[in-house]
Image (cartoon, rainbow, N blue to C red):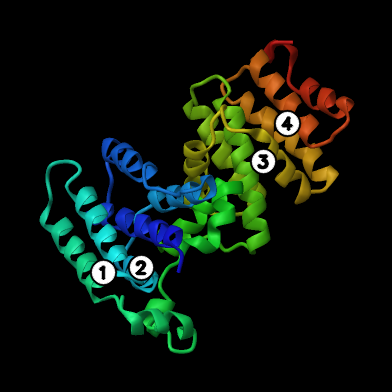
Amino acid sequence: MSNSNLILTLAKVIIAAAWADGEIANEELNSLKDLLFHLPDITGREWAMLEMYMDTPIGEAERKQLLVELQDEISSSADKDMALKALDRMIRADGTVTEREKLVAQEIRDAIEDADAGVFGLFGHLIKGPVSRRSAAVTSAPNREKYYEDFIKNRVYYGVQMRVEAGEAQIPLPDADLRKLSLAAGLMARVAHVDETVSEAETEQIVKMLETSWNISPDSAKLVTDIALAEISPEMDYYRLTRSFFDQTTEEERTQFLDVLFAIANADGFVSSAEIEEIRALSMGFKLPHKTFIDAKLKIPREQRAN
């Protein structure tokens, strides 16, 4: 295997070690990013993948799967040395090592030391397919990389899917509908964020719209709303959001959705100029006629909007 693959897999295992206590404080996360960013040969796309591993906790089953993948990547004593040194540097980065971190670090060291790195190990890599060392339990372990494209293109869907797989939520919708719902929630969150602060009324309105339009439970609607508000910000490029929403909706659905966006903007009783401009930009992204946007805007009483 190439050295770049080893570095990427090692980085994933290091992130798994950082999740040993079940949480990563914001300062620790920034330090972790500083450390990993300076690993050699990490491309932009690979960095986005590492961010996906930093996004939510890594449990024991997924960590063990990553350990096996790391073993498969080690093909020399130099690989072992590099992996061990990087691990030690990571574990001691904050100056303290918890007992849980020590246990996980030892587990990783054992996996690295047990990796076959001699001639037979190298030969084994050539024929490993049918004689893979992965057990059935490891094979069925969680693997967030199947959602990598969603992490890049539809962060709300990714966040919802991770909660569903973790057993924290149940949203009984076909996958296509869940993706569309997630895009809609992201666009509503974008409008709510325009004035830089999201009011309680705007949050409640998004929950209401998701609950009634998609026939999901109040708890599920609140979960999706919280994820959308956390993942979407005014700085996020809306082109991908609007294009994906356009691809998955009809013109009639997009027209009706403008009313939803104005309802979010008007949740606190007034639609600002910035909110109107944001919805106008989204309407253009939906490839709707300008008259359709104007018709939706005029449904808001004059005294409740900027213009």
Lower sequence index among marks 4 and 2: 2
Seen in the image, is 271 located left or right of residue 16? right
- Per the model, the C-alpha gap separating discs 4 and 2 is 44 Å
Number of labels in the image equals 4
Q: Is residue 116 above or below residue 180?
A: below
Q: Label 1 to label 4, Cα distance in Å? A: 50 Å
Circle 4: element type: helix
Q: Secondary structure at mark 3?
A: helix
Q: Name the residue rendered at 75%, 51% in the picture.
A: 248
Quickly name the residue at label 1: 112
Separation of residues labelled 2 and 1 (CA atoms): 7 Å
Q: Viewer-nearest of labels 3 and 1?
A: 1
Q: Nearer the viewer, mark 1 or mark 4?
A: 1
Q: Quick one: label 3, few (<14), some, or many (20+) residues within 10 Å?
A: many
Q: Is residue 32 above or below residue 288?
A: below
State which quadrant residue 271 falls in: top right
- Mark 3–mark 1 CB contact (< 8 Å): no
Q: Residue at x 12, y 45 (%)?
A: 96
Q: CA distance from mark 3 to mark 1?
A: 41 Å
Label of residue 241 in the image? 3
The amino acid pointed to by label 3 is Leu
Residue marked by disc 4:
282
- Tell me, yes or no, if residue 271 can be seen here: no
* SS state under label 2: helix
Quarter placement of the N terminus:
bottom left
